[in-house]
Amino acid sequence: MNYNEFMKAVDEKLSAMSEVEKTEWIHNMARTTNENQRIIFLNSLAKKQDHCTDIPIKKEIKELEDWCRKIEDAEIYFECSGYEEYGEGYWDSEYTYEYSDIFGIGKELSKAFQIAEGLLFQKEYQQAAAVYDLLCSITFSALDSDIEEWSELELEELVEEKLVILDLKRIALNMMYAKYQVTEGEERAAALYRYLSWDMCKNIKVEEMFTIGPEELKGIDRFMEDWISFLKNTEGDLAGGLLSEACIYQGGISRLCEAAREVWARHPVLYQHACKYLLNEKKEFECVKLGMEAISILPEKLIIRGSITDLAAKAAVELENTDIINQCYEAAFYSESTLYHYLRLFELSDYRNIADRAVQHAKTLPENSMWEGYHKNKQMMVNSLSKEHKKLLRFFNGEFDYIYEDCKKDGTTLGWSSNFKGTVVPLFILLLDKNKKVTKAGQRLIDEIEYRLGFTEDHTKSFKDQFLGWKEKVVLRNEQYEKYIAWLKEEVDKRTEAVVGGNHRKSYYKAAILITALGETLESNGKLHGRMVTIEHYKKIHPRKRAFKAEFEQLNEE
């Protein structure tokens, strides 16, 4: 229940109560109030306390302004000293600073925010808004006296470094509340949006502002309409998220769907939020209908179109609507050409032609980073694919000879964790393995591939399940097996010599996994005791590497 719904329900209850009943209710609320909340409760019953004179407040504000000027001019500052902090690894280090507050800035800052809150609860909103704006916009200076260099700290960093103890969320809400009281229309919307773009206001919902302060905010309904209008014309992910929240608050899912149809060109994310809402509410039919509408309207190149299609597909699965599922699976790949979306195509009846067309489409995609230029507007990101990802799709499209020839040109034996061959060699080993059950070594290979390819828990199927389903549809000729297995033996030989022979002790387990998986693949294809023979072969080559030998024990089947 949001604030709007809650307050309407409260007003209805209160209007039905007599004055005597209201008094009894307040009395009972007071009676059951916790001891540490009693002063707050009493203060909530008091009217605004008038100052005897404005002189003390004016004096405090003048002193505060002078103090802020000294901060900005770096007349008062923090001192710091830096040092290198090392972790376990050779390259695992970072530069750390320790700060000292020689001018008592933290203490003065806490006092300043107390003044701001005092002004707010005395309903001196204009002054409160000005003080909050001033305090939250200051950049603090820090001097490293060892090297005579200056650095800057934001308010959130002071809290993180424990230079001051502040409730940043409370401060942010008070600041927003004060600004609401002294502005109107588009000026109010623009000011609040500016605040919400700050890190200290991250994850704050606008309706939280309605629940604080000394009095109920007036004109909330009018403000929400102004807010929605402002956000519709403002680009970016922040505006899109806030617009979704505002629509749900103001008119529920119907208002959100209406806005999605109106501003899809600027905020396609509204379709995503609406489909997610409907799916969570178990309204699968409405989710499918809206999702298919989005597919027909949004440009195919938008990645978010693929995410919306996934939501519609989940709803279609619940409805057991095969036709919609097929449409969604194909549409998702064309908007977001991930390996997950590609392997899902093999679940369709006409998978061969569909998968082949999909790979041909993937070849035409731009290869620039899909994050480029979309830092604050990810909803407008367009589909792109790296060269390596395109080659991976060709592997899963059955173009094994092409991938084999490509990898043969690569002589890399170290650094496989970030190398294309480091993914392809394990994939070939898993492909040639005829075992129905995945072994420990096989699972370790799968886990690493899954991690590298970006599979997440959000996916309805794991890479392992998708891989095994795809593998059942693959047919290899005997000459292909012989060619690939000979190459894999060479690669595992070179990799083991580089890792174990090169004394890269922390990577011994990687070599052991490859060796074990290769032996299991050989055995599954008819080599007698292939697993044991392969492991013993490498143990004899490196007889003094006890740590290397011990790694094989971790891979034994129970």
Image (cartoon, rainbow, N blue to C red):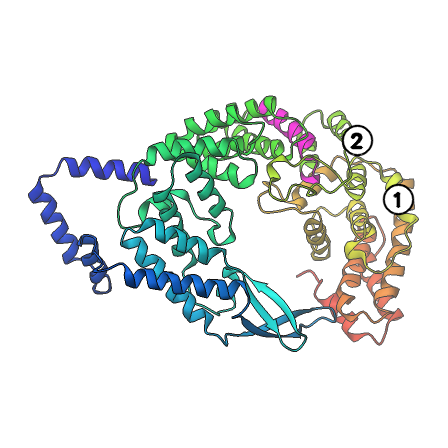
Relative side of 27 to 414, left or right? left
Viewport quadrant of the N terminus: top left
Magenta region: which residues? 324-340
| Mark 1 vs mark 2: in front | 2
Residue plotted at (50% across, 59% down): 138
- Pointer 1: what residue? 404
Nearest to the observer: residue 472 or residue 255: 255
Query: In the rendered image of this protein, does residue 225 appear above or below residue 83?
Result: above
Task: Residue 86: give x, y in percent of width and height.
Answer: 68, 73
The local secondary structure at tag 1 comes to helix
Tell whether label 2 touches label 1 (CB within 8 Å).
no
Main SS of the magenta segment? helix
Type of amino acid under label 1: Tyr
In the depicted structure, whether residue 87 falls above or below residue 323: below
- Name the spot of residue 91 as percent of width and height, x first: 74, 68
Residue carrying label 2:
364
